[in-house]
Amino acid sequence: MIDVILGLQWGDEGKGKIVDYFAKEYDLIARFQGGPNAGHTLYVNNQKVVLHQIPSGVFHSGVINLIGNGVVLDPVTLKKEAEKVAAFGIDLKKNLFISDRTHLILPTHRALDKASEISKGNQKIGSTLKGIAPAYMDKTGRNGLRVGDLLDKNFTTAYIKLRLKHQRLLDNFNFQEDISSWEEEFFEALEFLKELNIVHGEYFINNYLKEGKKVLAEGAQGSMLDIDFGTFPYVTSSNTISAGVCSGLGIAPQQIRDVIGVTKAYCTRVGSGPFPTELETETGEKLRKIGNEFGATTGRPRRCGWIDLVALQYACMINGVTKLVMTKSDVLDTFKELEVCTSYKVNGKETNEIPFHMDRQKPEPVYQQFAGWDTSIDAAGSFTDLPAKMREYVSFINKYLGVDIHYISNGPGRDQIIKIK
């Protein structure tokens, strides 16, 4: 069987910590989509570590980690990550495996990402400029290079052919930046990548499942950034929802057991795009400051707002969520009043559905007010230890969503997680 952990908002829900918490219960952790724009923050030996492509189970002894075919892989970022991980005594040659079908991010993909974003002017998507969208475009355009191609004697020829195609596109953008240093780094990183375990990912993971091993699929970004079901066009370039597990790892739908959805006790978003509950006020700034809401990958300040149950219910529906994890609940400790978005007003009518084009239809949030608990919860060890007003907040969310919160994170510490059920 395979369980899934994924984000239910616009990313940055704290999935890394949650995967790290559950990892010891599994034999294999697998990333199924996304690229180095993901930033999963962990605390190991009281040290902060940010992983971008390596699965979050890497610090657990005996746990195998797989980068699946649904990921787009930047070898340069991977090499830098590996050096950080190695400082903790982790040998990636023993516990990291990479699907040969995983597509590579080339230096020219990064250049195309930058050139495209610059050309959009005031209508920027908010790309992290990591080359992810161009890499996925080459994948769907059947032009991309994959990790398995590194083992082919004709790799350099294929690389030059694709680079020339990209150069013509860059010329159209009038992109003049010298990327020769990027290429030098890239080819050095390829040599490192070839030393790792390159496998037939779909057979690798299915053999684990046949042997009765426990597998955990780890998502990146969040459900509202899904290329099909997110707030298009302000989305990422992959399927971030549970359906992406099957295509991103090569496993059958009936193999999936629990879908564990992660949500903050409030809501954030990085970059451009619609965000109905955004607070461009002192309250929003307070959330940002207390929650340290700055991107793990880019350092960009995150936009902050109240929890949006319309979007959250939608995410639970399309993912088939069976369990919820609420993170960063301690950030709300000093708020005397809280608000929860329970519906939208669109064109003067109230609705509980996500509009087709949220950016154009501009839904207005309808809130329900709650009294804050106004006390620290960081020492709580059980649900009954939590303030009554917080338990009311959690119970309301459970009832609205029809899915229960099973775990609450009440602090940044690795073990600051309360199991409710």
Image (cartoon, rainbow, N blue to C red):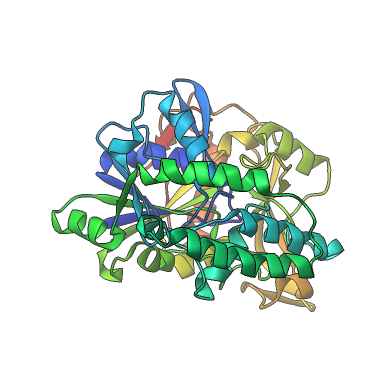
Residue 212 in the figure: left or right of residue 177 = left
* Residue lying furthest top: 45
Identified at 70% across, 76% down, the residue is 357
Q: Position of residue 179 (x, y in %)?
A: 69, 49
Q: Where is residue 18 in the image (x, y as percent from the top left)?
A: 43, 41
- Quarter of the figure with the N terminus: bottom left
Identified at 73% across, 65% down, the residue is 170
For the question of whether residue 48 can be seen, the reply is: yes
For the question of whether residue 265 can be seen, the reply is: no
**Image quadrant assignment for residue 91:** top left
The relative height of residue 123 versus residue 50 in the rendered view (above or below) is: below
Identified at 56% across, 67% down, the residue is 161
Residue 46 in the figure: left or right of residue 180 = left
Q: Position of residue 112 (x, y in %)?
A: 69, 61
Of the pair 303 and 351, the residue shown nearer to us:
303
* Residue lying furthest left: 211
- Quarter of the figure with the C terminus: top left
The relative height of residue 136 versus residue 199 in the rendered view (above or below) is: below
Q: Where is residue 222 in the image (x, y as percent from the top left)?
A: 55, 56
Of the pair 76 and 236, the residue shown nearer to us:
76
The relative height of residue 383 versus residue 273 in the rendered view (above or below) is: above
